[in-house]
Structures are given as C-alpha cells and as structure tokens.
Amino acid sequence: MGFHLQRIANAKRSLKRTLSSSETTMVPKGHFSVYVGEAEKKRFVVPISFLKHPSFQNLLSQAEEEYGFSHPMGALTIPCSKEAFIELACNLQSS
C-alpha cells in the first residue's frame, strides 16, 4: 500500500514536469500537445503512450463527437475539466 502511494506521488511529480502550461514550449520527441478545459483551455504535453490506453481513447472519441476535425485551438482539444484530465493522466503515468 505504501509503495503504491509513493508510486502515485512520483508519477504526479513526473507528470507536472511533462504536462506543460507554456504555449511556447517545444513538444519533445515521443509526446504531443492537447488543449484541455471547459471555458479556459490549458495546453498539456503528454507522452504518445497515452494513445494506447482505453480511458484516453474514450476522451479522443468525445473530442471527435464534440469538435470533429475542426479543433478551435488549432490542435487536439479534449472536452473535459483540467482536474479530470490531470487525474486521468496521473493514473496513466502510474500504470
């Protein structure tokens, strides 16, 4: 149990370094950027490995239903709250 909590804490620290809020940050190899949020969008840079996870694929399906191929920010936009996305990303990082 303690090891699992430590793993989650480490994943959150790693995620804070990976998830970027800077608009000018270059996207490193093996990552892609998404915009997340309901009213105000925030940019996150996430690893490509997220694409294979069913929960992230579900978000992509929601994005397709909401925006089709015309994303308002000019990049992939995920229609969920920032908090929900961060929670999902932390779970994906720790798995």
Image (cartoon, rainbow, N blue to C red):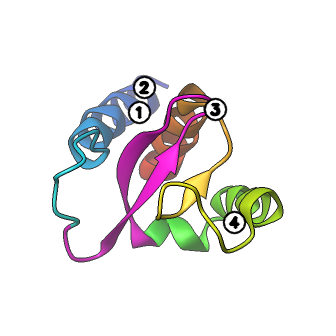
For label 2, count other residues whose C-alpha is less than 10 Å away and answer few (under 14), some (14-19) or many (20+): few
Query: Which of the pair 24/80 is nearer the observer?
Result: 24
- Element under label 1? helix
Q: State which region is magenta.
A: 28-48
For label 3, count other residues whose C-alpha is less than 10 Å away and answer few (under 14), some (14-19) or many (20+): few
Choose mark 3 or mark 1, whichever is in front: 3
- Element under label 2? helix
Q: CA distance from mark 3 to mark 2?
A: 30 Å
Task: Give the side of residue 18 with respect to residue 67, left or right.
Answer: left
Residue 31, image x, y percentages: 32, 69
| Residue corresponding to mark 2 | 5
- Element under label 3? loop
**Residue 86 falls inside the magenta stretch:** no
| Residue corresponding to mark 3 | 38
Disc 2 residue type (three-letter): Leu
Disc 1 residue type (three-letter): Ile
Residue 2, image x, y percentages: 41, 23
Query: Which of the pair 35/10 is nearer the observer?
Result: 35
Task: Give the side of residue 9 with respect to residue 41, left or right.
Answer: left
| Residue corresponding to mark 1 | 8
For label 4, count other residues whose C-alpha is less than 10 Å away and answer few (under 14), some (14-19) or many (20+): few
Query: Which of the pair 47/1 is nearer the observer?
Result: 47
| Residue corresponding to mark 4 | 57
Task: Give the side of residue 83 with respect to residue 42, left or right.
Answer: right
